[in-house]
Image (tube, rainbow, N blue to C red):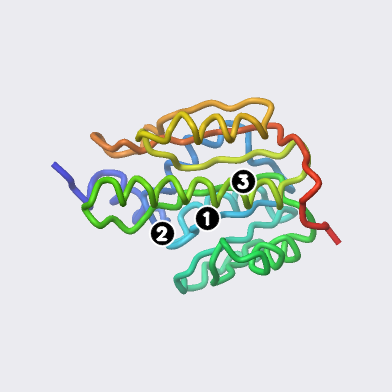
Amino acid sequence: MYERKDRLYRKAKAQGLRSRAAFKLEDLDRGLLGRGHRVIDLGCWPGGWLQVASRRVGPGGRVVGIDTRAMAPLGLPNVRVLQGDVCRDDVIEDAVHELGGLADVVLSDMSPSLTGIRDRDEAQASELVRRALGVAERSLRPGGSFVCKIFMNGEYRELRDAVARRFEHVSTTRSEATRKGSAELYLVARGLVPAVDRISPE
């Protein structure tokens, strides 16, 4: 049975976290986020992942979140939020500019707005993975890392292979904070192989 206000929801509220999803990133991190890192968080609303990333990168790091929805300020000096569409080149260029250089890590916890029509929902979820990969290819430094939500559907293998072609090591994992019965998984990719179409870090 789906329970929105479950144990992790209550724990997040008690710790001042914006969402229970913050515990997913804590679980997935495993050394990806380091002190001084530059991080882009795609689909950052309501801000739980931003809070975790902010703490992990420390005062010398920088985190830029992007979402189409407006978000109440987090009050974190090393975090900036851009309201915009991750499909727009100018939005991603602004994010890299705010970081002061190419990202060390790109995060994506983006999910589609579900319609209840399976084929449509799966197609939208897969498109979000492609969008996130496109951002990672352009905005990550060589050797950078990428974490992306993915669903176990008919396009899973094709999408995983697309990520594997651009990174030296890719694994699939399920966060312990994911609700039971969910088809949600995460791709964790390390070691971006550089391409010629990256954003200039100037």
Residue type (three-letter) at the residue carrying disc 2: Arg
Q: Is residue 10 above or below residue 66?
A: above
The N terminus sits in image quarter: top left
Q: Residue 171 appears in which quarter of the rendering?
A: top right
Q: Position of residue 142 (x, y in %)?
A: 78, 39
Confirm or deny contact between disc 1 and disc 3 (CB under 8 A): no
Residue at (55%, 36%) from the top-left corner?
A: 29
Q: Earlier in the sequence, mark 2 or mark 3?
A: 2
Q: Residue furthest left?
A: 1
Confirm or deny contact between disc 2 and disc 1 (CB under 8 A): yes
State the CA–CA distance, disc 1 to disc 3: 9 Å
Q: Which residue is mark 2?
A: 18
Q: Position of residue 99 (x, y in %)?
A: 73, 60
Q: Left or right of 125: which side holds 133?
A: right
Please tell me how crowded label 1 is: few (under 14), some (14-19), or many (20+) other residues with Cα within 10 Å: many
Q: Earlier in the sequence, mark 2 or mark 1?
A: 2
State the CA–CA distance, disc 2 to disc 1: 8 Å
On residue 56, which mark appears? 3
Q: Position of residue 119 (x, y in %)?
A: 29, 46
Residue type (three-letter) at the residue carrying disc 1: Gln
Please tell me how crowded label 3 is: few (under 14), some (14-19), or many (20+) other residues with Cα within 10 Å: some
Q: Is residue 107 above or below residue 165?
A: below
Label 2: element kind: loop
Q: Left or right of 52: which side holds 180?
A: left
Q: Which residue is mark 1?
A: 51
Label 1: element kind: helix
Q: Nearer the viewer, residue 90 or 173?
A: 90
Q: Nearer the viewer, residue 50 or 154?
A: 154
Number of residue marks: 3
Residue at (64%, 67%) from the top-left corner?
A: 91
